[in-house]
Image (cartoon, rainbow, N blue to C red):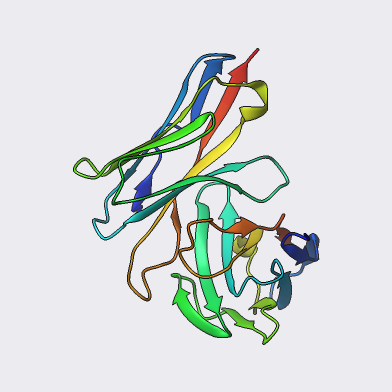
Amino acid sequence: KAGVTQTPRYLIKTRGQQVTLSCSPISGHRSVSWYQQTPGQGLQFLFEYFSETQRNKGNFPGRFSGRQFSNSRSEMNVSTLELGDSALYLCASSLAPRTNYGYTFGSGTRLTVV
Amino acid sequence: DQQVKQNSPSLSVQEGRISILNCDYTNSMFDYFLWYKKYPAEGPTFLISISSIKDKNEDGRFTVFLNKSAKHLSLHIVPSQPGDSAVYFCAASGPNFGNEKLTFGTGTRLTIIP
């Protein structure tokens, strides 16, 4: 069974640009969450989608947005990139929120803003 | 405000001995806790979870203990093996819509010494 697939794996963008990251969950999983990992802050929750609806949102500025499609695939978008947005962006999927089986993470997209 | 804290950034343990990783939380609404392991360049891998109705959950070499009155949980790995060397994150979530997101600690780097 395929795992959580995140594309691209690596990305270099210039300050002020915008970027879109993609996440394909495990087949059958309808919940997708996004996290930002930085060395000093650990994993910070961005947002969670379930059945195309945003259920939870973290404390990030409006430049960070996301959506989920009917096939459960999800995208997140960051506009007007800042140097501080450089991080590993992780996507996780599960059958539903708060399942006893935990969330399965992808390998992440490493975003570098220069 | 760090609602989930892992106060030990690193821990070294001899192979074959017990590894104990600790985690404290401040939000009394949290009722579901998870541990993840992360290797470099990979996404976190789910290890074990526990709900607040239990005080212990065991899965092979991994046992999680929950002390609700102290708002403390710990992960015991017995016996420790070299492959256990990784960064370990604890995470917590609450029961209500909008509070279900996983809040992660900052991680503890475990090194198993052969």
> Where A58 falls versus B33 (above or below)?
below
The one nearer the camera, B84 or A45, is B84
Q: Residue B63, position in %: x, y?
A: 44, 33
| Residue shown at the point (77%, 68%) measured from the top left | A13
Residue that extends furthest to the left in the rendered view of this protein = B69
> Where B44 falls versus A31 (above or below)?
above
On the image, which quarter does residue A86 sit in? bottom right
On the image, which quarter does residue B58 sit in? top left
| Residue shown at the point (58%, 55%) measured from the top left | A37
Q: Residue A65, position in %: x, y?
A: 58, 80
Q: Residue A50, position in %: x, y?
A: 54, 78
| Residue shown at the point (45%, 60%) measured from the top left | B102
> Where A11 falls versus B77 (above or below)?
below
Residue B99 at least partly seen: yes
Q: Quadrant of the C terminus of chain B?
A: top right
Residue A114 at least partly seen: no
The one nearer the camera, B67 or A61, is B67
| Residue shown at the point (66%, 22%) measured from the top left | B82
Q: Residue B108, position in %: x, y?
A: 50, 35
Is A75 placed left or right of A34 in the picture? right
Q: How many marks?
A: 0
Q: Quadrant of the N terminus of chain B?
A: bottom left
Is A31 placed left or right of B31 in the picture? right
